[in-house]
Image: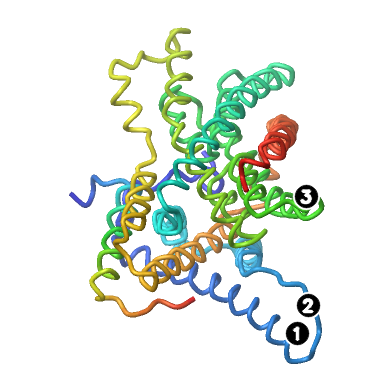
Amino acid sequence: MMKTLSVDWWSVILALAAAALIRMGAIPHISW
Amino acid sequence: MNTTVSRPAPRVVADRGGLLGVLPGIILLAVIGYAGKVTEQSITAYGTAHGIALPNIEYVLWAILFGLVVANTVGIPAAFRAGVDTYEFWLKIGIVFQGVRFVLGDVLKLGALSLLLVAIELAVSIALMTWLGRRFRLTPKLTSLLAIGSSICGVSAIIAAKGAIDADDEDVSYAIAAVLALGAFSLFAFPAIGHALGMSDAAFGMWAGLAVDNTAESVAAGALYSEAAGKFAVIAKTTRNATIGFVVLGYAIYWARRSQTSDIANKAGFLWQKFPKFVLGFLAISVLATVGAFTSEQAVDIANLSRWAFLLTFAGVGLRTDIRQMRKQGFRPFVVGAIGELAIAALTLAMILAAGNLLT
């Protein structure tokens, strides 16, 4: 599975996963 | 084929030695990008401490410059190259996160306006590049590649078109070199012109999104002007990228009719295959933000993740710009590209200024 996904799909999956973790409070505050 | 300037988009992040194989290059991107951020902050702090009004040079420029210096002096050791190539992944993930900064209504309004401007830009730039290519006696396929690269989105469009029109590696390398060289020039020229004309953040961002070819350079040019301009560059460029399938399909059909490539049986499948999927992620995050899925603090966190992803991207823009390789590519494709790009930049600037009221 990992070998068939394009960079585009990986960027979508990982970004949505990170957003979900932030929504759940699993990721602490991200500063800039 | 020149591997330095014509770097195909990696199919998967984990290729070439797995995640450990890309780690050194990602660390290099982070170090260079962070050095750019620290430099900006240090200059600002120095100016404040000494009461001197120093020009605020964004970290974007420092990250690109540091990357350029490293790539064109010591070079990028082989162990770092796979990781440096991931800059395109960080660009895409950064764009997806940017969705949090747009409510869906803005996306639709700006997207519709962008689409209209993109349609005009596409028609003019394809016609112009085709004419210039013939005038300068470039090969027909190199002309097609330059037209695709300058009308849509630079390197990824050229790579997408390569297989579809069965172009030579050498032509692909030329077209990519021209697009990258002009992209590097745009990074410095566009913000200077924008400031000279006193353009608003929205107008400048839309212009950078419409006229600068490669997505990374386009977003960087917007961010160099201001953070708000970077946001508008993302949406204009994303809209432009979304048209990639249609233009590449058009060219594929054109070359198939000239019996130089095989015809495309499943056109809908082809369009879906070429569609940049990160646009869907951008829309998904925008929809979630619009329906209130995130608190304002969470939205800030996601926007900050976007900034960190772009920090790696901008370091990559500098690192993969190899000036020596570009000089080897010859000047004719570059001249055609430069004349075409100047005309496209002027046309899109005129369109943006004419559409000024719609952007406020």
Q: Are the residues tagged 1 and 2 within 8 Å (C-beta)? A: yes
Q: Quick one: which residue is furthest to the bottom in this view?
A: B49
Task: Tell me which residue sits at (45%, 12%) in the image.
Answer: B260
User: For this rendering, which residue is in front, B64 or B82?
Assistant: B64
Viewer-side residue, B324 vs B105: B105
Looking at the image, tell me whether mark 2 or mark 3 is earlier in sequence order. 2
Q: Tag 1: residue type?
A: Gly
Respond whether the residues carrying marks 2 and 3 are from the same subunit.
yes
Q: What amino acid is at disc 3?
A: Ile
Q: Amino acid at mark 2?
A: Leu
Tag count in the figure?
3
Measured in 3D between alpha carbons, the distance from the residue under mark 2 to the one under mark 3, in whole angstroms, is: 21 Å
Which residue is drawn at the image coordinates 32% and 32% (left, top)? B273
Q: Nearer the viewer, residue B267 or B107?
A: B107
Pointer 1 or 2: first along the chain:
1
Q: How is the image coloured?
A: rainbow
| As drawn, B195 above or below B144 | below
Q: Secondary structure at mark 2?
A: loop
Q: Secondary structure at mark 3?
A: helix
Q: Which SS class for mark 1? A: helix
User: In the figure, B340 relative to B201: above or below?
Assistant: above
Residue B289 falls in image quadrant: bottom left
Which residue shows up at 42% across the image and 12% down it?
B256
Q: Are marks 1 and 2 on the same chain?
A: yes
Q: For mark 1, does the 10 Å Cα neighbourhood hold few (<14), some (14 to 19), or many (20 or more) residues?
A: some
**Mark 3 lies on residue:** B193
Q: Are marks 2 and 3 in contact (CB under 8 Å)?
A: no
Give the letter of the chain under mark 1.
B
Which residue is labeled 1 in the image? Answer: B47
Percent from the top left, x then y, of residue B5?
56, 46
Provide residue B341's location: percent of width, then percent of height. Answer: 70, 35
Give the percent coordinates (x, y) of residue B146.
Answer: 60, 29
